[in-house]
Image (cartoon, rainbow, N blue to C red):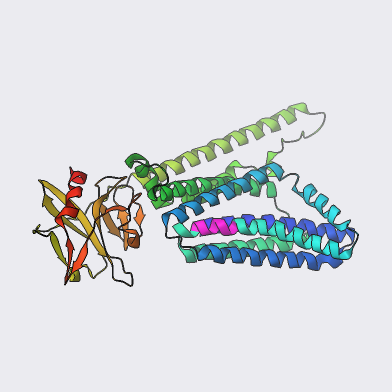
Amino acid sequence: MLEALIVTLREGIEAALVVGIIVAFLRREGYQRFFAAVGAGIVAALLLSLGGAVALYHLAVNQEVLEGTLYLVSAIVVSSMLVWMWRHAKAISGEVKGALARIVARPTSRGVWLGLFLFTLLMVFREGIETVVFLSALSLSSGGLLTLLGAALGLAAATVFGVLFVLGSLKVDLQRFFTITGIALAVFVVQLLCNGYHELSEAGLLPASPRTMAIVGPLVKQEFFFVAAVLLLPLLMLLVPGRGAARVAAPAAADNPAQARLERAAERRQRRARILGGGLGIVALFGLGLEMVYGQPAHSRSPATPLVLAADGVHIPLAQLADRHLHRFSVELDGRTVRFIALSTGEADGRIATAFDACEVCGNRGYGEENGTIVCLHCLSGIYPPSIGRSGGCNPIPLAAHVAGPDLVIARGDLEPGAKLFE
């Protein structure tokens, strides 16, 4: 929720600043009659952003390729936004006013109205679509309701800021605000990149190994960088000085250089103490976070139910699998114990998914069930149950099976390739 709040607050304030600059320019130049064009541009931008949100919501984001692509696109969008702000933050007011001056210089009122409408639409829509893309990625790794609540709070706060800013009754150290939130968003980008790599490697589009998945998997599972960015905010408030604190203390009197030197020395000591305290806090935060992620005891594998290998294979009563939980079985084959899993996917056709208890990336550590989700016990990747039976990434290696009467039957010939997985 806090990540969504930060994102929408920052993007909303950026949009409010642009709108405030437009309104102030038109008021100063005597073009108040075109305020309706600005309002229409804002409404159109919000509707287009909402349309983008609906389109992304209806995508089948439970597929690894689409999820990974959305994560990476979000990381690129946020990174480009941060770079653009760092480059243009100081000149944004002049650039907007320059564009507005060219628009109001058009010969006809219709041309001015249309120009202001399109300019406002593009400026606000840019912030809106950035927010939509980022929140869509957040919703994949956090609860949709909490993401929506955080976004609503952020937008409400940004709206209040925009109104007070336009009225001229609010003074905010915007440079400090954008610096702090920019650092937090940069940490978010790292999490998005980890999530994108994880999903695309599961889909088999990026190379992966047991080592890389063991490193990235827990970070994705625990949402480490999202949490770290939120916890960093109070430390960044300490590290990033405001405009008043950033100034070197002025001499108390022009004829008292000794007093001036004392004030500058005191300022330097305060700055060093602030940097040291904030730096130590960040190191401690990341140290404790990594301990939380990687210091947990290894997940244990539940015991497998042994089956007898008959001439035509193994038989499992369908009634045993009707509970839609993961079931682990084992069978002795060529002197090795071969493990496999089976579960009802909950689909309308009643399909039973079967697979070896191993994957091509993480080996034969196996799979478990955690709060109704199937997870790889090596990298903690969550597995979408209907995808079991498809090869690639961290999905369990497919194992063919068929229904014969009241039983699920797995042929001996289909089990034999699994012997080499459990050497």
Identify the residue at the far top of this view. Answer: 258
What residue is shown at x 80% (from left), y 68% (from top)? 36
- Comparing 93 with 180, the one in front is 93
**Which quarter of the picture shows residue 27?**
bottom right
Q: Is 290 in front, or is 93? A: 93
Given residues 422 and 152, the one toward you in this image is 422
Q: Residue at x 46, y 44 (%)?
A: 285
In the picture, measured across the screen, residue 229 lies left or right of residue 366, that is right
Q: Residue at x 46, y 58 (%)?
A: 140
Q: What is the magenta range?
A: 131-138
Residue 170 seen in this snapshot = no
Q: Viewed as shown, does residue 316 lie left or right of 293?
A: left
Q: Is residue 181 above or below residue 405?
A: above
- What count of labels does the image hold? 0
Above or below, 414 against 247 in this view is: below
343 sits to left or right of 140:
left
Magenta region, mostly helix, strand or loop?
Answer: helix
Q: Is residue 315 above or below residue 417?
A: below
Q: Position of residue 364 (x, y in %)?
A: 24, 47
Residue 83 seen in the current view: yes
* Residue 262 located within the stretch drawn in magenta: no
In the rendering, at what x and y percent does residue 67 appear?
46, 55
Q: Quadrant of residue 143?
A: bottom left
Q: On the rendered structure, is 259 left or right of 236?
A: right
How far across and how far down the image is residue 61, in percent? 46, 60
Quadrant position of the C terminus in the picture: top left
Q: Residue at x 21, y 64 (%)?
A: 402
